[in-house]
Amino acid sequence: MGKVDINKQRKKEALLNTAFDLFTSKGINDTSISDIVNKAGVAKGTFYLYFRDKYDIRNLLISHKSSQLFMSAHTDMLKANIDRMEDKIVFVINHIIDDLVKDKKMLNFISKNLSWGFFKKALMSNDNSNDHRNAYAGCGGYRRKACY
């Protein structure tokens, strides 16, 4: 990865981290794109290189943070060498609950912003690219009430 790609990745991560911090401290309705870019130290145009609007970045964050929870539980489950399916399910559920109990900020963010329409489409999709926009588009586009 070259310097340009590394710089792009840093800016995107700064936007994601800043948005998460602001969304969890101020709430999504009280956070503007200007708030995000100012705190992240990037130009407003940079935001639009990566995201359509604040709901787009919110959806990516929900998808990413939820995936992290499941992947962590899955990794630990594999290490635990559990054989029975029922035990695997209980392990994963307990692991996720424990993680959310430890991280109230994450729990609050996911619980307030979880969109079942978005995740239903993502889970039923055969696309493993982790591109949240493909799954979210199945809800009829962003900001559609039926997907919230």
Image: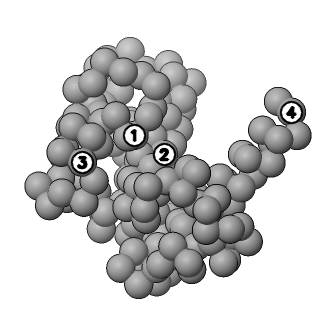
Question: How far apart, in angstroms, are the residues tagged by discs 4 and 2?
Answer: 24 Å
Residue that carries the numbered disc 3 in the rendered image: 141
* Circle nearer the N terminus (4, 2): 4
Residue at image point 14% right, 61% down: 145
Looking at the image, which is closer to me, 30 or 68? 30
* Circle nearer the N terminus (1, 3): 1
Q: Amino acid at mark 2?
A: His
Please, is residue 75 above or below residue 63 in the view? above
Please, is residue 18 above or below residue 84 in the view? below
Residue that carries the numbered disc 2 in the rendered image: 64
Residue that carries the numbered disc 4 in the rendered image: 2
Q: Amino acid at mark 1?
A: His
Q: Quick one: SS at disc 4?
A: loop
Question: How far apart, in angstroms, are the residues tagged by discs 4 and 1?
Answer: 26 Å
Residue that carries the numbered disc 1 in the rendered image: 132
Which label lies toward us, 4 or 2?
A: 4
Measuring from the top left, give residue 59's x and y in whole percent.
39, 53
Which label lies toward us, 4 or 1?
A: 4
Give the mark count: 4
* Circle nearer the N terminus (4, 3): 4
* Circle nearer the N terminus (1, 2): 2
**Dot 3 crowding, Cα within 10 Å, few <14, some 14–19, many 20+:** few
Question: How far apart, in angstroms, are the residues tagged by discs 4 and 3?
Answer: 34 Å
Measuring from the top left, give residue 35's x and y in whole percent.
57, 80
Q: Amino acid at mark 3?
A: Gly
Measuring from the top left, give residue 63's x and y in whole percent.
41, 46
Q: Is residue 1 left or right of residue 143?
A: right
